[in-house]
Image (cartoon, rainbow, N blue to C red):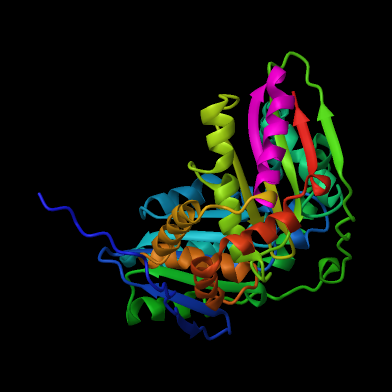
Amino acid sequence: MTLPAIHEIDKIVFPEPEKIPLQNNIPLFGFNGTKNDILRIDLIFNAGRWTETLPLQSAFVASLFKSGTSKYTSFEINEMIDSLGSTLKSASGFNSFTVSIYCMNRYLEQTLSHAILCLNECIFPEQELEHQKRKSLANLSLSLEKNDYLADNAFKKQIFGNRHPYGYETTREKIEQLTREHLLHYYQRELCPAKCTVFIAGKYGQDELKVLDRVLGGWSKEYRHGQADVKAIPAIPAFERNVLHIRKEKSVQASIVIGNVLFNKQHDDYAAFVLLNTIFGGYFGSRLMSNIREDKGLTYGIHSGLFTLKHAGLFSIQTDTNLENVEVCLREIYSEMERLQNERIPEAEIALARNYLLGKFLGRTDGPFNQAEVFKSYSIENVNIHKFSEIVETLRQTDAVSLQRLAQQYLLKENMLEVAVG
């Protein structure tokens, strides 16, 4: 048997989507190309946590998006959608609110009509809200027993502050204070055509585009200006080195989170830092995994990453270890940071991480569904999709000297917040 030849990944170009303005001026971006008659349509609203006037508004509106209208109950709405073999779901993010539709081409118009029904006529029945509150309180009680949940909460709250959309934690008080009027206020103000962008991926032609223009293009809902348009978002506080160890009774393990605020995709150092982080703790062959998991057996897994948002980026290292190993685990994490600052990374190690990343970037261009997913994430963060190819090119060119400079600038123990719960 002859093995296939191995080729280096050359230039990766992200395909330009088809841009089609709908009759009500909602922008529509299309990624065409599958063989099967199936579609995914995402309505992305410039909303999410960032535009809340009260914590958890966005999350509860997403949970109760199909909770009922004056004419249909929640059960009836779900039955209508299920009978078509379609899926309609909603999700709240830090800077976006998403309504996602999966359907067969022949049921596109009916499925879209059900989505518009939920976008225009949801009344958030009191009994549905109370049920969701009970469910959320039960989930919160379970989460509060988990060390990793507590550590992540404490980390974000310490970094951003408990009044910031990126930092506040879910509490019983925040859940209980929500009323039907709070949800209606958010729903009526944020889920409207003026704040919407549409993405379609799958097999579509002129017939499907006409349906989209007729249903989504004909969607009318007044944009109600409100407090969220002018509200002041608390500034991210200036950070100083801090250590926060929280004792949890009966724990035999501790969850560790270390990190700080960094930058998002728009920053000049983003692409090279992604490569540095991959070597440090971003994949299974990373230094943190090799040292702390493979060599010393202190954990089942350890990972570092740069989580990017529209208005910030958050770098963190996360792991779980036995209580008696916390100090040695922390020492080894900081030791690996110092190695990157003081020693140049061998070219073979850089090449391995680079090829891993280029393979992941190539996979993101494979097929319309992957392409749409990437394009949406860039759109939410307000980053031009041309940045994708720029990042790939920077990954190809970054050398050991540049990576050492980045480690000396960004991987400093004195700049890190350290949280351990257990």
Of the pair 92 and 168, the residue shown nearer to us: 168
- Is 319 on the left or on the right of 218, as rendered? right
Q: Is residue 209 magenta?
A: no
Q: On screen, 110 above or below 176?
A: below
Whole-percent x, y for residue 78 in the image:
48, 49
Of the pair 185 and 315, the residue shown nearer to us: 315
Whole-percent x, y for residue 170 in the image:
77, 41
Image quadrant where one finds the C terminus: top right
Whole-percent x, y for residue 292 in the image:
59, 31
Whole-percent x, y for residue 131 in the image:
67, 36
- Is 270 on the left or on the right of 166, as rendered? left
* Residue beneath the point at 27% across and 59% down: 6
How many numbered callouts? Answer: 0
Of the pair 188 and 46, the residue shown nearer to us: 46
Q: Is residue 113 visible?
A: no
Q: Chief secondary structure of the magenta span?
A: helix
Of the pair 334 and 361, the residue shown nearer to us: 334
Q: Is residue 229 visible?
A: yes
The quarter of the picture where residue 326 lies is top right
| Residue at the extreme left of the image, as rendered | 1
The quarter of the picture where residue 311 lies is bottom right
Q: On screen, 284 above or below 16?
A: above
Span highlighted in magenta in the image: 317-341
Q: On screen, 109 above or below 249?
A: below
